[in-house]
Amino acid sequence: MGHEGAGIVEQVGTQVSKFKKGDAVILNWATPCMKCFQCTHGNQNICENNSPVVAGDNGYNKGHADLEGTLWNNRPIERSFNIGTLSEYTLVKASALVKIDSEKLSFSSASIISCGVMTGYGSVVNVAKVNKGDSTVILGTGGVGLNVIQGAKISGASIIIAIDINTNRLELAKQFGATHTILADKNDKGLLLAAEKVKALTSGRGADFAFECTAIPSLGAAPLAMIRNAGTAVQVSGIEESITFDMNLFEWDKIYINPLYGKCKPQEDFPKLVELYDEGTLLLDEMITKTYPLNKLQEAFDDMLAGKNAKGVVVMNT
């Protein structure tokens, strides 16, 4: 937590030229160095030098070595994903910022772009590359799942099937672009019964694309059951556990991919998302169920864990 955020630049270092005091900005946790192997191959989201997620000496460790600029009693403080936005002030690299060019966008709505919206939208547009007329299915309609749905709608998908165990979330999914909904049963192992309903809605073949957004390990293989032969399953939620796969689910020619952060290129993707919002194509305000002042942080955590919000946003008191 504290890995999404937006705010106003208060001060800049002597070598910073692209930002000035008073700039409105979105904060980005995946700060590319633009020099490493992955960055030069177009994979800024998995930068080998700055990523706080990518494991290994060139990823996690080096990414956290930059945190010594923030001190408490002369000791460095480790901030969430290098930006630590659950605070009134934070010190970040210039590469963690993207200017906001919009008269309409509030800081609350801007803040959710920097992970949940980007991950969902990017998984559809940058990773799967869904095209007009394609069929899609989304497993889990929380904050990320709703943005997968939005990405599918913006891409022109003709069928957008939302699957969840929560009827309220399925109603929300319709608001964000789902054309069909399936109420799942908790006892449906691997969602195989739900998969049959998906096939019935997609000419018996299965969907072209399926996106897993539940973060439930036992459903890691479920999107494979939803797609047609030569279809693509995208594991969006980032499950990091050992999972047993029935290899029959891969038959035939199916692709399974586990992307990070929707293959985000922040300086390119964030302005696109802001533009879509300004056009009225991308819903952001509607996604924020509730905002909380900093002194209500415990309430915000409790509501998050209880699943009350699509997105909850902490608003600073300053």
Image: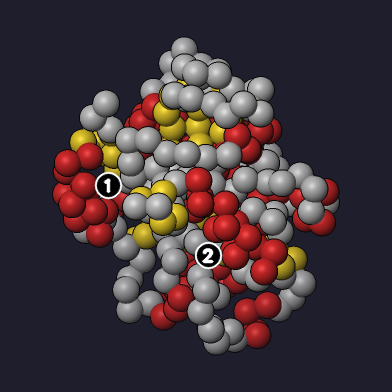
* Amino acid type indicated by mark 2: Gly
Residue name at image x 58 percent, y 84 percent: 245
Residue 106 appears in which quarter of the rendering? top left
Callout 1 secondary element: loop
Tags 1 and 2 touching, CB below 8 Å: no
Residue 61 makes an appearance in the image: yes
- Most extreme residue toward the top is 103
Quadrant of the snapshot with the C terminus: top left
User: Residue sitting at 54 percent across and 26 percent down?
Assistant: 12
What residue is drawn where x is 21% and y is 36%? 293
Give how far apart the Cα atoms at labels 1 and 2 are: 20 Å
Q: Is residue 69 above or below residue 256?
A: above
Using the rendered view, name the quadrant where residue 286 is placed.
Answer: top left
Which amino acid, mark 1? Asn
- Residue under label 1, please give it: 309
> Which residue is farthest front?
74
Residue 33 horizontal side relative to residue 244, left or right: right
The residue drawn where x is 65% and y is 84% is 248
* Among the 4 quarters of the image, the one containing residue 185: bottom left
Element type at mark 2: loop
Does residue 253 appear left or right of residue 23 in this picture? right
Residue 111 position, x and y percent, is 42, 35
Identify the coloring: secondary structure
Residue 276's mark?
Answer: none
- Residue toward you, 213 or 173: 213
- Residue 317 spot, x, y in % from top left: 23, 30
Q: Residues within 10 Å of mark 2 (few under 14, many from 20)?
A: some
How far across and down, in percent of the image, does residue 88 sit? 32, 35
Q: Which residue is disc 2 drawn over?
A: 238
